[in-house]
């Protein structure tokens, strides 16, 4: 994971807060998914929990993406960085496939 701070994070406190919330939701989902996948039998409640955690991450990511497109400061930084609409997403991506 890329942990280098982005310009957006340095300039926009709301972007940084939303990115941290998104990262936290992803970590929680990944950790719980790993715990459950190590058990032999997955109960309906655990499946429901994984779906809820996945939805929490998806919601946090959507809010981050929306902010990045709607915030004038973030949009300006994106344009200056060559149009990268979601600078910072690389830190969330770990190339893992989720089932």
Image (cartoon, rainbow, N blue to C red):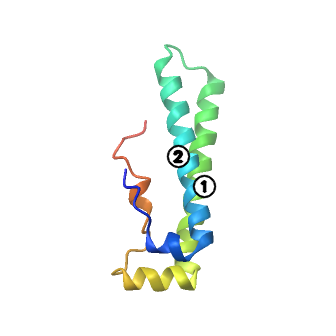
Quadrant in which residue 53 is drawn: top right
86 to the left or right of 57: left
Q: How dense is the environment of label 1, judged by Cα within 10 Å: few (below 14), some, or many (20 and up)? A: some
What is the secondary structure assignment of the residue under circle 1? Answer: helix
Quick check: 72 above or below 2?
below
What is the secondary structure assignment of the residue under circle 2? Answer: helix
Total numbered badges shown on the rendered structure? 2
Q: CA distance from mark 1 to mark 2?
A: 9 Å
Viewer-proximal residue, 24 or 97? 24
Image point (55%, 31%), residue name: 32
Residue furthest to the top in view is 40
Quadrant including the C terminus? top left
Image point (57%, 71%), residue name: 66
Quadrant in which residue 67 is drawn: bottom right
Viewer-proximal residue, 80 or 47? 80
Q: Which residue is mark 1?
A: 21
Image point (57%, 80%), residue name: 70
The x, y position of residue 80, in whole percent, is: 38, 85
The x, y position of residue 62, in whole percent, is: 56, 62
Q: Along the polypeptide, which appears first: circle 1 or circle 2?
A: 1
Q: Which residue is mark 2?
A: 26
The x, y position of residue 42, in whole percent, is: 55, 20
Image point (37%, 47%), residue name: 94
């Amino acid at each position: 994971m890329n942990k280098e701070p982005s310009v957006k994070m340095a300039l926009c406190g709301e972007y940084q807060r939303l990115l941290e919330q998104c990262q936290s939701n992803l970590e929680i989902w990944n950790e719980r998914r790993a715990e459950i996948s190590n058990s032999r039998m997955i109960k309906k409640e655990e499946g429901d929990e994984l779906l809820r955690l996945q939805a929490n991450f998806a919601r946090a990511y959507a809010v981050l993406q929306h902010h990045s497109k709607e915030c004038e400061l973030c949009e300006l930084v994106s344009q200056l960085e060559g149009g990268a609409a979601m600078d910072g997403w690389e830190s969330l991506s770990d190339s893992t496939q989720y089932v």
